[in-house]
Amino acid sequence: MTLALPPGFRFSAATSAFQIEGSRDVDGRGRSIWDDFLEAPGAIVDGSTADPACDSYRHPESDVALAAGLGLDRYRFSIQWARIQPEGRGRGNLVALDHYSRVVDLLLDAGVTPFPTLYHWEMPVAVEADGGWLNRDTAARFAEYAALVVERLGDRVSHWYTLNEPAMTTLQGYATGALAPGRQLLFGALPTVHHQLLAHAAAFEALRAGGAQQIGLVNNHTWVLPLHDTDADRAAAHMYDMIHNRVFSEPLLDGMYPDLESLGFPPMPVQADDMARIRASLDFYGINFYNPTTVTSAAPDSPIPFGIVPTPGVPVTGFGAEWPIMPSALRDLLVDLKRRHPQLPPVIIGENGASFPEPATAGRVDDQNRIDYLTGHLAAVAEAIEAGVDVEEYTVWSLLDNWEWADGYTQRFGLVHVDFETGERTPKASYDWYRDLIAQHREEDAR
Ligand code: FCB
């Protein structure tokens, strides 16, 4: 199938450090909030730890070879703050900086542009002990960390993601407690929105001062659908859209928070020139998209003013009804975002992909379901481009099967199968499909 993607469109695949690296106690690494979280009884469905995961810290060259084998333009990976600043402040840990420097060199030698993320959901426990994202000072500490990294890698890396999905950190890390740091503050988590966006802006400034050229943040977006066409369900959907999408996108794209007070929430802890800094902090806008969310009005005794329910009439991924498959939702949200924000910077899809039940032991996986999912979403991107949205890049989550946070090893998202007992990597059918798609696109570009 040929997809109508424009010439020069770029292809990438992603991983994140804690999900693939293992080696949690080497080279002076400090403790991160995920080391604490995974030890809490019942926090991880299969009771697993992220060690050895894909053992990528010890063998980065095998991941780089797989990325290069696909013909990727770029590879999205992340850097662990707790490796660079084990205590969350002070000088950079040189051994860890050397490690990431080597990853960068391996990628460049293989012809793949390194595209690191500075914060993919983990911070040193020392920063969390001071309040984590509830504390405004964390923004400045994050910028210090960014400065250390760009000082070491900035001669070779010019493309950076600052934060991955601040919405998930707020909603699941601080509001419900499903992810680290496991706080259950419900709407008391809202200040973490502003402190993360401020951290992004401060890191943007530090990276730019270090010579970075392309800097952005990647937000998780969902397309919110009311279950019934009733006032109550539409109001619940509006509320959910605010706290999942718009409270994170509008400050970046318009320099303003949406009207939270009319929904009964306290105002954000904004000071002086915060909003101007946040607004001026994007060379591109990153979007991670997985699924739509169907919302209904809250159950009478619920502490939350909406209910999330299965999306009727669509297939699902390995997560079941929690992750409905609806590629048109990606097109619709991109078109809607451009309509709301005519000055939208170039968009990069920073993650898109699906898990399906697959065997644990090494072997070829014929994952036509994943190929269908990815094809559908790439077609949705092509339609959004056709409708006038400037999408420049698409990233598959994930290059490799890995440790899926609270779901441990039970959800496989990779283009490459990983046997976590032996470390053996086996490209799936989707790997060959993506490689061929990229090659075909390059041929068309050359014509
Ligand atoms: C995203 C995360 C990524 C992975 C995928 C499945 O929300 O950024 O680390 O867990 O979901």
Image (spheres, rainbow, N blue to C red):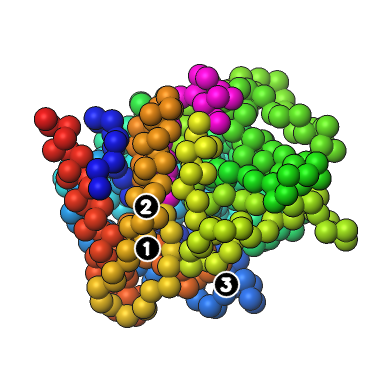
Which residue is found at the position 43% from the left and 27% from the top? 387
Q: Quadrant of the C terminus?
A: top left
Crowding at mark 3 (Cα within 10 Å: few <14, some 14-19, many 20+): many
Residue picked out by circle 1: 369
Q: Is residue 378 left or right of residue 61?
A: right
Which tag, 3 or 1, sits closer to the chain's start? 3
Q: State yes or no: discs 3 and 2 in contact (Cβ < 8 Å).
A: no
Q: Position of residue 297 (x, y in %)?
A: 79, 51
Q: Position of residue 36 (x, y in %)?
A: 59, 66
Label 2 element class: helix
Q: Position of residue 386 (x, y in %)?
A: 38, 29
Whether residue 413 is situated above or below residue 41 in the rendered picture = above
Q: Which residues are magenta?
A: 336-352
Residue picked out by circle 2: 374
Whether residue 301 is situated above or below residue 295 in the rendered picture = below
Q: Amino acid at mark 1?
A: Asn
Label 1 element class: helix
Mark 3 or mark 1, whichever is nearer to me: 1
Number of the label disc, if any, that sits on residue 44: 3
**Residue 191 in magenta?**
no
